[in-house]
Amino acid sequence: MISTLGAIALLAFASPAMAGEGKFSRADGFQLHIKCTGSGCRVRGKEPNGKWGLVEKGPGGSNNYKKLVAKYNGMGFE
């Protein structure tokens, strides 16, 4: 039987740590979803009434998440 502490440790190592996640939109209706973990960042975008598609992928971490948010804020996404 796994102890409670062992189960918590197992769960902690089984899922990647979140570095940042957020949804943003622009005045023309274009939407972005930025999701970063320790292993990588993924930016997905969607036109109004369209399907989600990959915009870019890059290195992970909270610093890279902050850089992506600043980049897209500068492009009019809030």
Image (tube, rainbow, N blue to C red):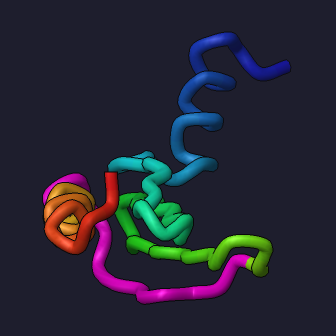
* Residue located at (59% from left, 49% from top): 15
**63 on left or right of 50:** left
Tell me which segment is drawn in magenta: 52-63
Residue 63 x/y as whole percent: 14, 58
Query: Who is closer to the viewer here, 11 or 77?
Result: 77
Q: Which residue of the protein is positioned furthest toward the right in this rendering?
A: 1
Residue 11 x/y as whole percent: 63, 35
* Residue located at (60% from left, 23% from top): 8
The image quadrant where one finds the N terminus is: top right
**49 on left or right of 71:** right
Query: Who is closer to the viewer here, 68 or 24?
Result: 24
Count of numbered labels shown in the rendering = 0
Residue 36 x/y as whole percent: 40, 61
Indicate whether residue 70 is drawn in magenta: no
* Residue located at (70% from left, 77% from top): 52
Query: Who is closer to the viewer here, 23 or 10?
Result: 23
**44 on left or right of 41:** right
* Residue located at (51% from left, 62% from top): 33
Indicate whether residue 58 is drawn in magenta: yes
Q: Which residue of the protein is positioned furthest toward the front in this rendering?
A: 28
